[in-house]
Amino acid sequence: MSDEDSAPVASGTNTVERGVSIDQDGKSNVWAIEPKMEVESKSAEEKGGSLLIAGGGIAAFLAVAGAILANLPDPDQF
């Protein structure tokens, strides 16, 4: 293990390794430490493209809804 895997204890001389502990029976327990996640942010071009697609979808929905509502029969005829 590297020096990055151990952190000093408050007493100063002993070191504690991350991911390792010893229980009351004296048995050592080891578990995995997952690496930090790296999150990639979207560029301005990607955000602009997403907004255009969303705006186009809304416009298409409104056009279809308007066409359907404009062609419904008059309820007073019945």
Image (tube, grey):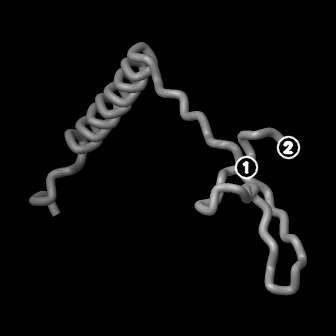
Residue plotted at (85% across, 43% down): 1
Image quadrant holding the C terminus, namely: bottom left
Residue neighbourhood size for the residue with mark 1, other residues' Cα within 10 Å, grouped as few (<14), some (14–19), many (≥20)? some
What amino acid is at disc 2? Answer: Met
The foreground one among 26 and 78 is 26
Left of 69 or right of it: where is 3?
right
Q: CA distance from mark 2 to mark 1?
A: 8 Å
Work out which residue is located at the far right of the displayed protein and give it. 27
> Splitting the image into 4 quarters, where does residue 59 fall?
top left
Decide: marks 2, 1 in contact (CB < 8 A)? yes
Left of 34 or right of it: where is 11?
left
Identify the mark at residue 6; answer none if there is no mark. 1
What amino acid is at disc 1? Answer: Ser
Position above or below: 29 against 40: below
Q: In this figure, which residue is indicated by the disc labeled 2?
A: 1
Relative image position of residue 19 (x, y in whole percent)? 76, 59
Relative image position of residue 68 (x, y in whole percent)? 29, 41
Relative image position of residue 64 (x, y in whole percent)? 32, 35
For mark 2, give the secondary structure.
loop
In terms of sequence position, does the residue under pointer 2 or pointer 1 come before the other?
2
